Amino acid sequence: MTLSKALLARQSFLTQALMVLGGSLVVGMSAQVSVPMFPVPMTLQTLAISVIGLSYGSRLAAVTLIAYLAEGAMGLPVFAGGAAGAQHLMGPTAGFLWGFVGMAWLTGWLVERGLDRGFLRLFAAAIVPAMLLFVPGVGALMLVTGMAAGKALAVGMTPFVLGALVKAAIAAVTLMGGWAALGGRKG
């Protein structure tokens, strides 16, 4: 059971469309909170994606991130630092951007499979996809820039691991708070 289904048992197409729009806006806003690093900036996007995946479930979370990528490709300034344009979907950070869809989907899938309650379960549902995000992220960084694996890991993963752990913990606590606000009721 996802938090969004507990809140809104019957989700019409309009409700889901509004959730996708709202979620994609949250991801876009979280991209603007960044520490400029080259070539991969540190942002709050993965925190937002974890919360969306934990609360929306697999399909709706993935659609939300696809909408986010489409918004950026169409020229809306939703990527890190207010960047926009389809070229970002083929640049050094492309693996992270495309990987966000998989991260959102897997986070939601894990929640749908029972990792929906309690800190450790929610943390696991958030951290596993966050760590797997480094696979396409570092892979594309190597492919696009020609960087050696060691250098790509040093600039595309190492500085972000501690942040991923902290963001997964914050996402888990956030969802625990959401469930507590609902009185712990389950579908």
Image: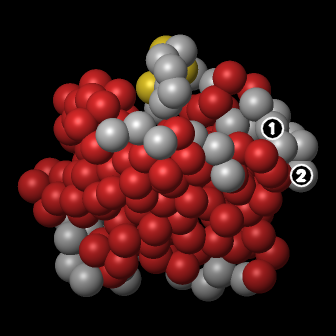
Q: Label 1 to label 2, Cα distance in Å?
A: 8 Å
Question: Tag 2, which secondary structure?
Answer: loop
Residue drawn where x is 40% and y is 54% of the image:
139
Q: Which numbered disc, 1 or 2, marks the residue that appears first in the sequence?
A: 2
* Secondary structure beneath label 1: loop
> Few, some or many C-alpha atoms within 10 Å of disc 2 (few <14, some 14-19, many ≥20)?
few
Estimate the x, y position of residue 159 in percent, counting from the top left: 28, 25
Q: Is residue 35 above or below residue 101?
A: above
Task: Tell me if label 1 and label 2 are in contact, CB under 8 Å.
Answer: yes
Q: Provide the residue designation for mark 2.
A: 74
| Residue 136 image position (x, y, % from top left) | 42, 58
Query: What is the three-letter code of the residue carrying label 2?
Result: Met
Residue at left offset 41%, top offset 38%: 147
Work out whether residue 187 or residue 24 is closer to the camera in this orientation and state it.
24
Q: Which quarter of the rendering shows the C terminus?
A: bottom left
- Residue 46 in view of the camera: no
The residue drawn where x is 10% and y is 55% is 120
For label 1, the residue is 84
Instruction: From the viewer's perspective, tell me whether residue 172 is left or right of residue 11.
Output: left
Where in the figure is residue 46, as x and y percent of width and height? 43, 43
Nearest the viewer among 140 and 11 is 140
Tell me the quarter of the image containing the N terminus. Answer: bottom left
**Residue at 54% over, 79% down:** 59
Amino acid type of the residue tagged 1 in the rendering? Ala
Most extreme residue toward the top is 36
The answer to whether residue 138 of the structure is visible from this angle is: yes
Q: Which mark is residue 45?
A: none
Which image quadrant is residue 47 in? top left
- 94 or 120: nearer the eye? 94
Is residue 157 positioned above or below 13 on the image? above
Q: Quarter-wise, where is residue 84 in the image?
A: top right
